[in-house]
Every structure is written in C-alpha cells, then in structure tokens.
Image (tube, rainbow, N blue to C red):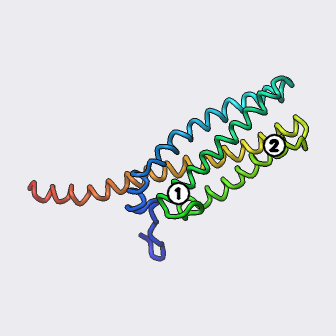
C-alpha cells in the first residue's frame, strides 16, 4: 500500500455481513427490488404510450401510483434492513449517498402523487414529472447495483485473502 493511503474500508464489517445474511429483510429487499423494476418497466411503457399517442392516460396514471407505492414499500423495508445491518434507519456510511439520492427519488414520486391528487398539473406535465421521477429511480437503482457488485467483489477478496495463508501453509507441509 502506498504511503499516505488509508486502508480501504470494506462495504460490510464481518459483523454487519453476518447481520445482513441472517436478516429476513435481506430476502424482502431481494424480492422487492426486481418486482419494483418490473412495475417500473410496465409503467414506463404506459407513460410513453400516452405521450406518443395520447391514449391510455388513466392506465399510465394508475401505473405510476402503483410504482410509487412499491417504492414506498421498498424504502420502508430498506430502512428496516439498514437498521438491522448497520444500526441506523438511514444514512449508514456504507449507503449514505444511495440514501441521499433515494430521498430525491421519493420526493419526485411524492410530488407526482400530490400533483395527481390536486390536479395542479395537466396530463402531459404530470407524465413528464413521472419521467423525471423514473430517471432518478434508474440512477438510484444503478447506485444500489454498483454497491451489490462491490459487496460481491469484497466478499470474493476476503475469501481469497483468508484462503491464501491456508494455501501457503498447505504448500509448506506438502514438501
């Protein structure tokens, strides 16, 4: 390690990894995330259909409401998961920026619900707001996928590091 370089903090400590693996909320998140993406994809098609043809406004509106409720579910259960794993509901250091961006995603989805309820935006503007919310959702989903990849790489690195001394020890005794 170069001089002046701090050691890289793993995404999860050993204790956090054990809590993550033991938590039922990990499975809930693993099931809700792809379900939410499916709801998003269907809704996006309905929104684009409306914007391109002018048809299917109610279906597009209902789909955004369903997507928003799914987002609320994953955010609530994700906060519970974060509490189980890291001891805090939001803004654990390992997921700080993902949580910050999640708040923006929630705000835009909630603004959509408020505008739909109050009628403060026209149909076209409402769908543009939904698209803005969906763009932030995609960025946020990308953040979490990146963290999932980092967690897997970290786990692989730990396994290789812990196996290396055993391999060396085995080689010494084999000769």
Res 129 label: 2
If you read the primary sequence from the N terminus, does the residue marked by circle 1 or circle 2 appear first? 1
Whole-percent x and y of residue 117?
Answer: 84, 42
Whole-percent x and y of residue 170?
Answer: 15, 55
User: In which quadrant is the C terminus drawn?
Assistant: bottom left
Relative vertical location of residue 77 with respect to residue 169 in this rendering, above or below: above
User: Count of labels shown?
Assistant: 2
Q: Residue at x 39, y 53 (%)?
A: 155
Left or right side of 22 for 106: right
For the residue carrying disc 2, how many other residues have a C-alpha within 10 Å: few (<14), some (14-19), or many (20+)? some
Residue at the far bottom: name it: 4
For the residue carrying disc 1, how many other residues have a C-alpha within 10 Å: few (<14), some (14-19), or many (20+)? many
SS of the residue under disc 1: helix
- Image quarter for residue 88? bottom right
Q: Residue at x 77, y 27 (%)?
A: 59
Q: Residue at x 48, y 72 (%)?
A: 5
Residue at the far front: name it: 117
* Closer to the camera in the image, 22 or 125: 22
């Amino acid at each position: 390690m170069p001089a002046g370089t701090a050691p890289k903090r793993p995404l999860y400590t050993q204790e956090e990894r054990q809590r993550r693996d033991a938590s039922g909320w990990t499975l809930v998140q693993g099931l809700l995330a792809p379900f939410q993406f499916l709801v998003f994809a269907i809704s996006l098609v309905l929104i684009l259909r409306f914007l391109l043809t002018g048809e299917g406004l109610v279906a597009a509106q209902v789909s955004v409401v369903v997507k928003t409720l799914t987002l609320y579910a994953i955010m609530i259960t994700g906060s519970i998961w974060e509490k189980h794993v890291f001891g805090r509901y939001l803004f654990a250091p390992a997921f700080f920026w993902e949580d910050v961006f999640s708040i923006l995603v929630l705000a835009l989805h909630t603004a959509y619900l408020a505008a739909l309820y109050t009628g403060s935006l026209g149909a076209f503007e409402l769908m543009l707001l939904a698209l803005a919310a969906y763009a932030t959702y995609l960025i946020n989903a990308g953040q979490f996928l990146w963290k999932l990849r980092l967690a897997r790489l970290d786990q692989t690195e730990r396994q290789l590091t812990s196996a290396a001394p055993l391999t060396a020890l085995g080689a010494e005794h084999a000769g």
